[in-house]
Amino acid sequence: MRSQAAGSGDRAKLRSVPPLESARPEPEQAAAARSGSLPSAALATAAAQVTGTAEKLVTKLLEATDTSTSIRPRPAEIVELGVNVLRAALTGAGLPADQIEREIAGTLAYVRRRLTGEVDVDEFGFDEDYTLHIHLPLLRPLYQRWFRVEVQGVENIPATGGALVVANHSGTIALDSLLTQVAVHDEHPQHRHLRMLGADLVFSTPFLGMMARRSGSTLAANSDAERLLGKGELVGVWPEGFKGVGKPFSERYKLQRFGRGGFVAAALRSRVPIVPCSIVGAEETYPIIGNMPAVARLLGVPYVPITPTFPWLGLLGLVPLPSKWLIEFGAPIDTGSLGPEAADDPMVVFDLTDQVRETIQQTLYSLLMQRTSVFV
């Protein structure tokens, strides 16, 4: 995709990443691949619009900078470079050619909407356009290729209306919540969005908090949870919190305390079902063999882990081990028959919390027996 537009004067000397022939389908194949998402004519129009707009913006940027140098790329070169880099990254992640072209087309259409100001967010900051075209596509290579996630019981998630998904939490870095979000959207027939409840630390962290909001997360508070459930949203909570994510490898797949049952009270007041979710595989991504509490206090974080690869290998130690993941959604637990007043009864809340926790724990044991190998 190369435009004829060029900046006046200097010739471009910036070379783009060479296209990967294995990732570029033939014309007939490309048309077939695109037909699964948008008509080819619409894709061509969107691509032309975003290319033209991007080149105009790049032209203005180049004009505003120092033009004394003779090395000055054309706007078309920069746009083409971005597309080629994206194609190379998706190919390196092992995605099939047709999916690569769909992802590129969707990204181009997304960029066009951003450049023209077509942005729509809800009262919590959720940006569905960003989630569909940036957030989820970035996670899919991990989901499909690296961890090879298998999902069971997705039919237990309601097709419509509010529901609360409650899952175990582990893995040092909370990849389990992100990949559960991918599993719900990609595996469920209705492609529902999982609105996750996150800790204060997530939203107080620069950049991370903004990305979490845009992808549908909100603060783990009963008021926010009840508002989302009342609007018919699918809400996800990981009640172990940092106690689960940061537990040592010796305690793997042993559930920590589920707090005070606030998530159960929210479900009772909203009269929505609770769907237990059990995740196997996250424990082995970054096995914690030690901790650095002094460094954690200095940084103001719950823990700074020591793993078999971190900090010994530096930044390479941040690469997760490619464990095999299994995610199972259990049968919904009804709360409507108890009535919203049950949320104020400590014994009812405690019993229901314990039922959810025990269901997840027993399912974890069952999934561990199904998994033939940690990495295969």
Image (spheres, rainbow, N blue to C red):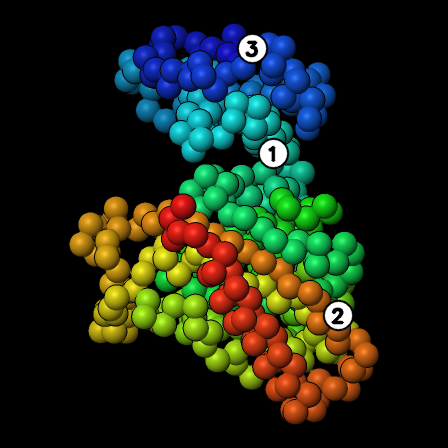
Q: Residues within 10 Å of mark 2 (few under 14, many from 20)?
A: many
**Amino acid type of the residue tagged 1 in the rendering:** Tyr
Vertical side of 116 occupied by 33: above or below: above
Is 212 located above or below residue 90 in the figure?
below
The structure residue drawn at horizontal position 73% and vertical position 78%, both measured from the top left corner, is: 268
Disc on res. 272: 2
- What distance separates the C-alpha of mark 3 from that of mark 1? 24 Å
What numbered label is drawn on residue 110?
1
The three-letter amino acid code for the residue at tag 3 is: Glu
Q: Residue at x 70, y 59 (%)?
A: 156
Sequence-wise first label, 3 or 1:
3
Report which quarter residue 36 is drawn in. Answer: top right
Which marked residue is nearer to the observer: mark 2 or mark 1? Answer: 2
**Residue 316 position within the rendered picture, expressed as x and y whole percent measured from the top left:** 25, 46
Distance CA(mark 3)–CA(mark 2): 49 Å
Nearer to us in this view, 131 or 340: 340
Q: Is residue 289 above or below residue 314?
A: below
Task: Tell me residue 333's x, y (percent).
Answer: 71, 72
Q: Are marks 2 and 1 in contact (CB under 8 Å)?
A: no
